Amino acid sequence: MASPLTAGLSREPNLVPMIDVLLVILIIAMISPQRSALDAVPAGPASASGEPQHPRPAPPVLRIGPQGELELAGTPVAAAALPAALRALASTRTPRLLLVAADSTIRFQLVIDAMDAAKGAGMDVIALEP
């Protein structure tokens, strides 16, 4: 026997709030890929003269060979002369970026020492090249 308070009530769930939430999630899912695609497009200022802009030059690479030999931007460098060569390179480049490519057989301490020398020479961004 039903009580007088629940006599006219049904026990069916109300689906309207759930559908509203699903629609909001669907809209967010549709907008977010477009937003991330817009954030990824680099947009620089247009040239006033109408000439095409030249791409940035490739960053210099500090290569460390299997015997610990150093090569900076294609030029062999002695370990003692590396800080001075890095300072000269950092003073001529606007984005002070350096890639470090090391042989897989050397001790990683040599790579760390080279990266410390680059940071001390004024390089702002130092990245390992795979």
Image (tube, grey):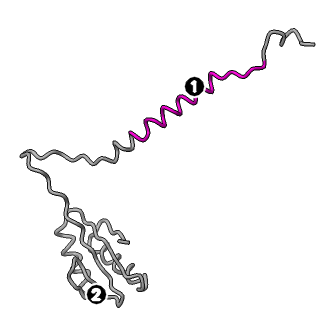
Report the disc number at residue 119. Answer: none
Q: Identify which residue is drawn at 22% across, 66% down.
A: 58
Q: Identify which residue is drawn at 36% across, 88% down.
A: 66
- Is there CB contact under 8 Å for labels 2 and 1? no
Would you name the residue on which mark 1 appears? Answer: 20
Q: In this view, does 12 lie to the left or right of 107?
A: right
Would you name the residue on which mark 2 appears? Answer: 79
At which x and y percent is residue 49?
Answer: 6, 46
Secondary structure mostly seen in the magenta stretch:
helix
Instruction: Tell me if residue 66 is in the magenta stretch.
Output: no
As shown in the figure, which amino acid type bears the numbered disc 1?
Asp
At which x and y percent is residue 39?
Answer: 34, 44
Question: Can you tell which quarter of the image residue 102 is in?
Answer: bottom left
Query: The magenta stretch spans which residues?
Result: 11-34
Please, which residue is most extreme toward the bottom here?
67
For this rendering, which residue is in front, 15 or 95?
15
Q: Identify which residue is drawn at 34% across, 48% down.
A: 40
Q: Is residue 82 left or right of residue 47?
A: right
At which x and y percent is residue 91?
Answer: 18, 70
Quadrant into which the C terminus falls: bottom left
Mark 2 packing: few (<14 Cα in 10 Å), some, or many (20+)? some
Q: Specify which label sits upstream in the sequence, 2 or 1.
A: 1
Q: Identify which residue is drawn at 80% across, 9% down.
A: 8
Secondary structure found at label 2:
loop
Measured in 3D between alpha carbons, the distance from the residue under mark 2 to the one under mark 1, in whole angstroms, is 66 Å
In this figure, what is the number of numbered marks? 2
For this rendering, which residue is in front, 88 or 111?
111
Question: Can you tell which quarter of the image residue 30 is in?
Answer: top left
Q: In this view, does 25 lie to the left or right of 13?
A: left
Quadrant into which the N terminus falls: top right
Instruction: Tell me if residue 16 is in the magenta stretch.
Output: yes
